[in-house]
Image (tube, rainbow, N blue to C red):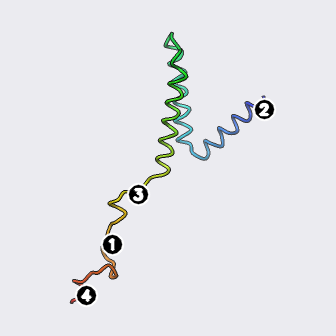
Amino acid sequence: MSALFYVVKEMWASITEDYLFTLAILTWVFVVAILRRSVPDATWNAPILLVGLLALLLFSVASAYRIPSVSTKHKKPTNDKSAGNYRSARR
């Protein structure tokens, strides 16, 4: 019973921290459970569950890491006088 309480407590902590990720995990587990009941040969259920959960994890890590693109990194300021706005300096 304490193991079940621990699992529920950890799931609640993960819901409050990142509810979209938890919702995606629960949805994927639900989809695999429905597939398990509808498909008579259930040998592929565990690998499908694993691949889906790993894909969700990789997507979550990639979206949290977000590498800035090169075009936004080297963008020149438009109204900065120190950036060499010579046209307004000559007037």
First of labels 3, 2 by sequence position: 2
Residue on which disc 4 sits: 89
First of labels 2, 4 by sequence position: 2
Question: In the structure shown, which secondary structural element does the residue marked by tag 3 occupy?
Answer: loop
Residue type at the position of mark 2? Ser
Q: Position of residue 39 (x, y in %)?
A: 49, 13
Q: Residue furthest bottom?
A: 91
Q: Position of residue 68 (x, y in %)?
A: 41, 57
| Residue at 50% over, 24% down | 48
Is residue 23 left or right of 85 when viewed as pictured?
A: right
First of labels 4, 1 by sequence position: 1
Question: In the structure shown, which secondary structural element does the residue marked by tag 1 occupy?
Answer: loop
Residue on which disc 2 sits: 2
Residue on which disc 3 sits: 68
Q: Position of residue 91 (x, y in %)?
A: 21, 89
Residue type at the position of mark 4? Ala
Work out how far the residue at label 1 is from the one at label 2, CA to CA, in angstroms: 58 Å
